[in-house]
Image (spheres, grey):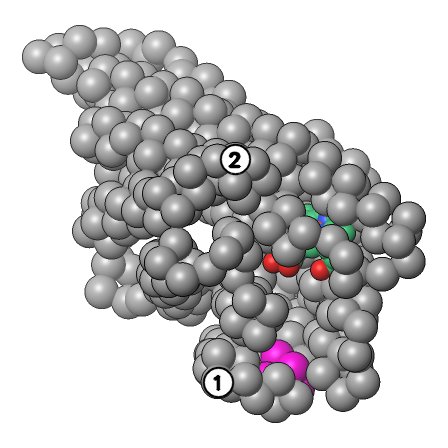
Amino acid sequence: MVTKTSAETEIALQRMVTIYVVTGLLFLLLPGTFLGVWNLVSISGQHTLGGLSRAWLQAHGHAQIFGWLGTFIIGIGYYSLSKMGGLKPVAVSRGWTSWALWTGGVGLRWAANVSEFHWRLLLPLSAVLQLVAFLIFFATVSRHKAEPGSTKRAVLETWMKLVIAATVAFLIALLVNQVETVVLALSAAHPEIPHWLDQRYLFLAAWGFPVLAVWGFNAKWLPIFLGLREPSSNRLMAALATSAAGLTAASFGYLRLATLLLLAASIVATIALNIFAKPRKPAKTLGVSASFPSFVRSAYVWLVIAAALGVYAALDDTKGGIWGASRHALTVGFLSTMVFVIGQRVLPAFCGMRLLYSKGAHVDISDGPEYRLLPSCRL
Ligand code: HEM
């Protein structure tokens, strides 16, 4: 039960997470997909990747990873972690500040990469805006506490460890982005990250925070939504450690080792989450497509394909095509499928939860009438 003040905070948080989701979808559609298709058409026209503007390729990648996935993660992080720690009005004002800075930063980055207009100023500025937006988010959610009265207060659950690792990886990606943009502004002819560095950075940007965040939220939600057995904590921690080792190897340029470690981590995480094991009870498909469990499983097939293609690319790709296939098996096959499939399950509850007026016995009259969250909307 929540007081009126909490009810107002809940409504304000819902409005905020809705804007985050819509913003992410706009980045996906316009700067992301539009430019991706444009690049693809140019590649098929020229039969090679070589002649394409790296700045445009990178504008597409940045808009998709940070503009779409990043905006979703920050918005949902603000909403769900604020609720877990008790609704606090300050989360709403900080959420809006982060949104303005983040959206401005990602938008500027895209515009500077595509137009090269004052890019030496705009590129580092865009990175600063993104970093500050994220630091506000980081400071807000890292102080959250477990639900009041929860007996689990002292125990850090495995899914939370994965989400924390994802948040740290996100911060590292933004710090590297900041350094990269300053170095480019001082020394490059165009707003293009050199290929050797971009390739290493993309491991962190794609296999780092998005994948770890999905594993973390899957560990929490899939036993409920799909009726899966509880994940194995030890195996999930092994997957996290292997993945961290893979990302470290990639950052030093050991791409064969990195891809092998990421393949191992992907297989271990899939086993740990019991994705293909016999479920303990039927999936909850009320209100969503009956094929919802198959889509979740298909995303994990894509994850393993992406990792295997990465190994193949590290061994044999000289033109960049296999790397691109691996990258999109991961970003479109695994991450996008997962966002769309889990999104349809959780976002209606996050963005449209209704509050019921209640004349319950414990009305806090000092603070106005009392409200309850509709039980059907609880996750
Ligand atoms: C309609 C969908 C999409 C199309 C047509 C498309 C097309 C492309 C093309 C042609 C490239 C350059 C070649 C390559 O490196 O593979 C590229 C690169 C990339 N794409 Fe996509 N893409 C799409 C969706 C996505 C999504 C959903 C994501 C992430 C969530 C994504 C992330 C990336 C990244 C990170 C790069 C590398 C950019 C760089 O070189 O720095 N793409 N994409």
Query: Badges 2 and 1: C-beta atoms under 8 Å apart?
Result: no
**In the image, the residue with mark 1 has its CB under 8 Å from the nearest atom of ligand 1:** no
Which segment is the magenta one?
258-262
Q: Position of residue 220 (x, y in %)?
A: 50, 57
What residue is disc 2 on?
Answer: 111
Picture disc at residue 114: none
Q: Position of residue 347 (x, y in %)?
A: 55, 33
The amino acid type found where label 1 is placed reads: Phe
Q: Position of residue 151 (x, y in %)?
A: 26, 58
Q: How many marks?
A: 2
Q: Position of residue 356 (x, y in %)?
A: 40, 14
What residue is disc 1 on?
Answer: 252
Q: Is 20 situated above or below 260? A: above
The amino acid type found where label 2 is placed reads: Ala
Q: Is residue 297 magenta?
A: no
Helix, strand or loop for disc 2: helix
- In the displayed structure image, the side of residue 343 where residue 37 appears, left or right: right
> Mark 2 packing: few (<14 Cα in 10 Å), some, or many (20+)?
many
> Mark 1 packing: few (<14 Cα in 10 Å), some, or many (20+)?
few
Report the magenta stretch's main SS: helix
- What quarter of the picture does the N terminus occupy? top left
Nearer to the camera, 289 or 323: 323
